[in-house]
Image: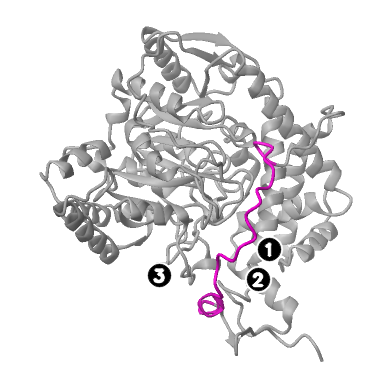
Amino acid sequence: MSITKEEVGKIAHLARLALSEEETLAYATQLDNIVKLVTVLQNTNTDQIKPMAHPLDAKQRLRPDAITEGNERDMMQAIAPATEMGLYLVPQVIE
Amino acid sequence: MTHYTLADYQQQLAAKQISSLELTEFFLKQIKAQEQLNSFITVCDDVAREQAKQADSQRAQGKAGPLTGLPFAHKDIFCTQGIKTSCASKMLDNFIAPYNATLVDKMAAAGMVMLGKTNMDEFAMGSSNENSFYGAVKNPWDLDYVPGGSSGGSAAAVAARIVPAATGTDTGGSIRQPAAFCGITGLKPTYGRTSRYGMIAFASSLDQAGPMTQTAQDAAILLNTMAGFDPRDSTSLDVPVPDYTANLNDSLKGLRIGIVPGFFGNGLHADIQAAIDNSKKVLEQLGATFVEIDLPHHELAIPTYYVIASAECSSNLARYDGVRYGYRAAKPENLLDLYQRSRSEAFGSEVKRRIMLGTYVLSSGYYDAYYIKAQKARRLLSEDFQNAFKNVDVILSPTTPDPAFKIAEKSNDPVKMYLSDIYTIAVNMAGLPAINIPCGFSGKLPVGMQFIGNHLTESKLLNIAHQFQQHTDHHQKAPEISL
């Protein structure tokens, strides 16, 4: 199976990347080669095998429900490209 | 010039033969003299001098700890408050972190002096350090060659003796492979052993920070401070930290070392094969025996890794949207345009490729076939190791199939580049610790071998590496430019 230009375009949109025509073509070939590398997985029998999400199969640790962090909005927003009155500014999304 | 180790400087500082400020000035000068390597993104002259003065004053008051006053460098993936943390990306070229990574705080609290932030592959994605927004790092043994990656700046700097030690991170071999290419010692600890808080995420279930040093003893000294539980990292291991220097001198008598026959011969460079054969003789003389083992699913390692690491990378890097911090495209037409152009203009091509691959394997219709399948293969890979460790204490393997390659030799062929990670990535899938140590040369380029241990056996790995280094001198060889 090979990856088409249209598929690359769809993936790029999902990933919020704008690709040039040239990049789209290059990624189509390269992704195709990588996916070919991955086909060995499809030929492996993994019936009865549980997916492994974490190297030590660790359980999510829970912490006591206590406040440990203060309000750091000003500090966090100090590095934002554009803010106003404690809000992040983006192009208008609601007419 | 005489090359001292971290342990040597530790003694000289304790004996007050040298001050931390003198040591710091010396290394700042060395860094400047080797700018051709491009191993640093930021040099922190002022911060380093300030920390050195504090360290000297602590010592004068009799309050010095074992690491007080020792200079080192951080890979530019660790967030440093008030100092640029770029992850070698245009995306974060303007990023001044509002907080410190836990490891940055820990090493500062131990009195260490941060000389600067080292170059790397963008977001730690790469095996050659060519994917940096700040340009490729050069291998100090031959400037036409890559230092390996992604922790290439740290490896080159330690090898060139312009820093006594550095931190690195390893997601698929990013500490061990550059350590092998540059002829230094590099330890990737057990997953969860060192904190990931404030370490910019690439693939969260694989990323792990570790020391990059001249010797195993130095790695032990650093790991003593780096390791430990961090409540701010939800995957941090809450288990006691031993003194990693305590067992360095244990005898290797009776040590059972596993060898995978398939790792040798076909596909392995003859010089690396020869270097490991010679090393095995040394280990045998020290009392170790070799046992053949099998890792039957090893051929799945590379495909499994590239599915899982890319999937996690595409999720982790979704946060870079041009809204809250980092690069923002000029004059966006609308919100979608802001996201798309900020990301497209600021990510390099390898990062985009992995985001694309990760998005593809997680997308509807492919999730089970690729992502879940890879997670199942990951368990097979992990179980292979557990079965092997029933019969052996550690596994000895090459770190890389070939010595360092030339700059630009593989940069247009991602698959070829990925295949060079064949010996390192299964270790990350299984969350195991592994250490690279130098074991010989191929022409003028150093080559390395790695010892892989079961979870939390860092002390054993350091013990073996130290004993080997007590009986060989590969780790003492330094590139000509440093002499």
The type of residue carrying mark 3 is Gly
Q: Mark 2 points at which residue?
A: B321
Q: Residue at x 28, y 23 (%)?
A: B473
Q: Name the residue under label 3.
A: B82
Quadrant for the N terminus of chain B in the image = top left
- Mark closer to the chain start, 3 or 1: 3
Q: Quadrant of residue B53?
A: bottom left
Residue A93 drawn above or below residue B29: below
Residue A11 drawn above or below residue A70: above
CB under 8 Å between callouts 1 and 2?
yes
Q: Nearer the viewer, mark 3 or mark 2?
A: 3
- Judged by its main secondary structure, the magenta piece is loop
User: In the rendered structure, which segment of residues is drawn in magenta?
Assistant: A54-79
- How far from the left and from the top, in percent, is residue B201? 58, 54
Could you classify mark 3 by the number of other residues whose Cα lies within 10 Å: few (under 14), some (14-19), or many (20 or more)? few
Q: Residue at x 72, y 69 (%)?
A: A18
Q: Gap between marks 3 and 1, in whole Å?
A: 24 Å
Q: Left or right? Give the position of A93 relative to B139.
A: right
Asked whether the residues under marks 3 and 2 belong to the same chain, the reply is: yes
Q: Nearer the viewer, mark 3 or mark 1?
A: 3
Q: Left or right? Give the position of B186 relative to B444.
A: right
| Residue B444 visible | no
The type of residue carrying mark 2 is Asp
Q: Kindly identify which numbered label has been placed on residue B318.
A: 1
| Mark 1 element type | helix
